[in-house]
Amino acid sequence: MSQGRKIPHCMQEQHHALSEPQGLEAAQVSKALEETSSCSSHPLMPGNLKEALAAGAPSTPHSLQSAYSSYTVTTISSSKSDKCFSSQEKETGSASSKSLSETEGLPTDPLDEKVTLLVQFLLQKYQMKDLITKADMIGDVIKEYKDDFLEILRRASECLGLVFGIDVKEVDPTSHSYALVNKLGLTYDARLSGDEGMPKTGLLIIILGVIFMKGNRATEEEIWKVLNMMDLYSGREHFIFGEPRKLITKDLVGEKYLEYRQVPNSNPPRYEFLWGPRAHAEASKMKLLEFLTKIHESDPACFPSQYEEALRDEAERA
């Protein structure tokens, strides 16, 4: 076992029944993605992105992260040891009985607007494949809040990582220039195939995570159950991810990130998703598990089966 990893006290007995999402949690996922708190319409956005996002009303970046936290708890709870549920998850569960309207009147952080604008600015740079500099971020977006640059950049980076599956990396400390790179070492770039929309890596990471947590294969029904929570439905165009069935059964399968096949001996035919060869070659299972558990302040070792598999994967990559 790898040295230096913190191992919390976890019971080895695992839950095998995927907990049903509470109505409010599913609503939060749907609402947050539709409103896209960090990506609401703004003049800084190029025309096509601006129009695609204009349907959403401004909110706060925290609502997106809260919604994804609810989704992640639902996705991975089937494998988590009983004593690993954090106090945050318990609070989230108790808070889910409150309506969203109860929180609408709470004061908002004045930095949230700048975080929203910075996410939009960075997505525009991603589309244009332009260089990103600290000077541009301060001069074009942050302006009078320049003393809070690091905090605003941190929050924007968290949102980009959670929703779009991309990290903001400083590539030149001297000129303070940055680049947007895919999480988990994935090299998928829809722009290479003429897709000028927003990054799709976030959805790929979610699907890979569901497959991994489900024992390295997930039925089509299990995948769509999670995607429906995110307001992604077969045949319905989504303003971030496009038509999801085409994306996951054609594009991501064609890129060798996913394998989509008939369940052996199923009659009538049923289908399942597995990791494709490119996912096995590029994605670290430990980094994926760390990403999923970090969202709600858990620990990879709270998932004994997946954690041991991730350790073996790390050893093979060493």
Image (cartoon, helix red, strand yellow):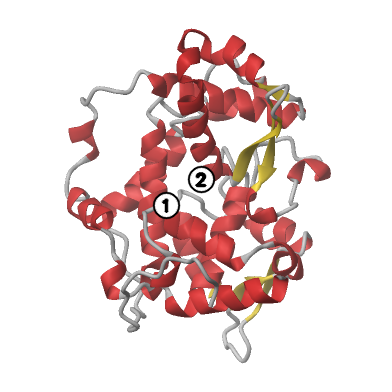
Q: Nearer the viewer, residue 160 or 249?
A: 160
Give the percent coordinates (x, y) of residue 311: 57, 75
Residue 35 is left or right of residue 97, and the answer is right
In the displayed structure, would residue 103 be above or below residue 305? Answer: above
Instruction: Name the image quarter holding the C terminus.
Output: bottom right
Give the percent coordinates (x, y) of residue 235: 59, 52
Give the percent coordinates (x, y) of residue 217: 57, 77
Tag 2 secondary structure: helix
Residue 19 is left or right of residue 221, and the answer is left
Label 2 sits on what residue type?
Leu
In the displayed structure, would residue 108 be above or below residue 201? Answer: above
Label 2–label 1 contact, CB within 8 A: yes
Q: In which quarter of the view is residue 59 placed?
A: top left
At a point 36% along the width and 38% down the height, the residue shown is: 63
Q: Nearer the viewer, residue 56 or 125?
A: 125
Q: Which residue is mark 2?
A: 162
How many neighbours does mark 2 have within 10 angstroms: few (below 14), some (14-19), or many (20 or more)? many
In the displayed structure, would residue 135 be above or below residue 215? Answer: above
Q: Which residue is mark 1?
A: 295
Q: Nearer the viewer, residue 173 or 251?
A: 173
Residue 287 is left or right of residue 61, and the answer is right
Tag 1 secondary structure: loop
Q: Nearer the viewer, residue 8 or 56?
A: 8
Asked if residue 40 can be seen in this view, the reply is no
Q: Using the numbered discs, state the Cα–Cα distance from disc 2 to disc 1 in whole angstroms.
A: 8 Å
Give the percent coordinates (x, y) of residue 208: 59, 64
Q: Please, which residue is most extreme toward the top here?
A: 144
At a point 58% along the width and 30% down the height, the residue shown is: 52
At a point 52% along the width and 79% down the height, the residue shown is: 308
- N-terminal-most mark, 2 or 1: 2
